[in-house]
């Protein structure tokens, strides 16, 4: 356990593949989670496209990192939030997104899906609650 | 021969698509590639502008870029064609020039 534990919020606003932001964010998320920080992810604007299920970048010669999102629950990431307005502006619903299961290995507590669609007011609260917000 | 315009930015993040559609002449072709393919999807905030443009220009989306992002032909605005890389080359060869909107 690290001596200092911070509540870190990762704010993801870029589509995957077109730029390196999404992949870089995921790398840093995994690193900070491994250091026992309290990690939350929020997806908004084109960032919601990162969670669209069924991605297959084999045809464009890029690594498929989308399956890594589904393992976040194994890294003790318990909170993944998606902005409702950003989904609506893109004709998407929660049904278009991957599901991320979560389990506490110590207590056996389980959640089938930690991906939560939220309104802007809740997003505002989450930003206020975080010790630090990392933007990608 | 007409111009082939390519757009590689998301319509929700940049004005590339809007500028392209504003300047594309009737009969031109517009190929959506990379993050530009998001403009080809149904029911988005950009769909009305794309449907309007389809009345005067041909619009295509690059299949491998759609597939990478988890979408397929069934998710597209009707009237938009899907091209593979060979189709991209054929379209470029059949056009007077290629103009990129970055």
Image (cartoon, rainbow, N blue to C red):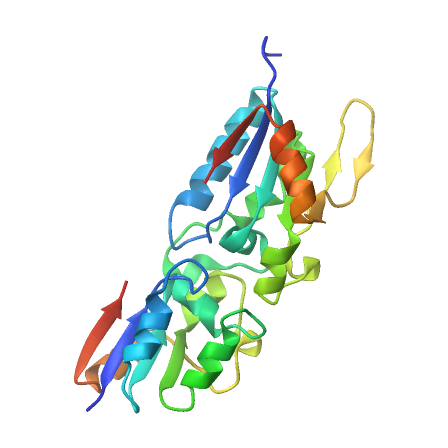
Estimate the x, y position of residue A119 in percent, counting from the top left: 69, 49
Q: Is residue B27 above or below residue B85?
A: below
Residue A71 against residue B37 in the figure, above or below: above
Between residues B75 and A124, which one lies in front from this camera angle?
A: A124
Residue A84 lies left or right of residue B34; in this view the side is right
At horizontal 22% and vertical 73% (from top left) the residue drawn is B99
Quadrant of residue B30 within the rendered picture: bottom left
In the depicted structure, whether residue A118 falls above or below residue B87: above
- Residue B77, given in percent of the width and then of the height, sits at 52, 80
Give the residue at x 50% y 38%: A26
In which quadrant of the rendered image does the N terminus of chain A lie? top right
The residue lying toward the viewer, choosing from B50 and A59, is B50
In front of the other: B51 or A56 = B51
Residue drawn at x 65%, y 47% is: A120
Residue A71 location (% of width, % of height) = 62, 40
Residue A53 in view of the camera: no
- What residue is drawn where x is 58% and y is 60%? A54
Task: Give the left or right position of residue B49, taking residue B58 as reference.
Answer: right
Q: Quadrant of residue B90?
A: bottom left
User: What is the x, y in percent for residue A5?
Assistant: 61, 16
Q: Is residue B74 above or below residue A88?
A: below
């Amino acid at each position: 356990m690290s001596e200092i534990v911070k509540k870190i919020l990762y704010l993801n606003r870029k589509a995957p593949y077109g730029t390196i932001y999404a992949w870089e964010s995921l790398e840093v998320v995994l690193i900070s989670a491994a250091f026992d920080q309290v990690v939350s992810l929020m997806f908004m604007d084109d960032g919601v496209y990162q969670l669209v299920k069924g991605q297959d970048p084999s045809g464009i010669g890029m690594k498929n990192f989308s399956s890594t999102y589904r393992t976040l629950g194994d890294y003790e990431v318990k909170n993944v939030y998606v902005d409702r307005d950003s989904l609506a502006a893109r004709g998407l619903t929660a049904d278009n997104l991957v599901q991320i299961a979560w389990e506490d290995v110590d207590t056996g507590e389980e959640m089938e899906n930690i991906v939560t669609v939220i309104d802007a007011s809740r997003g505002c609260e989450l930003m206020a609650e975080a010790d630090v917000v990392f933007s990608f | 021969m007409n111009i082939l315009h390519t757009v590689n930015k998301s319509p929700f993040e940049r004005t590339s698509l809007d500028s392209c559609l504003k300047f594309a002449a009737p009969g031109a072709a517009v190929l959506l590639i990379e993050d530009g393919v998001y403009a080809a999807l149904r029911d988005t905030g950009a769909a009305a502008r794309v449907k309007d443009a389809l009345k005067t220009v041909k619009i295509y989306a690059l299949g491998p870029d759609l597939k990478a992002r988890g979408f397929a032909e069934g998710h597209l605005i009707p009237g938009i064609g899907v091209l593979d890389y060979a189709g991209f080359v054929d379209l470029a060869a059949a056009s007077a020039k290629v103009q990129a909107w970055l």
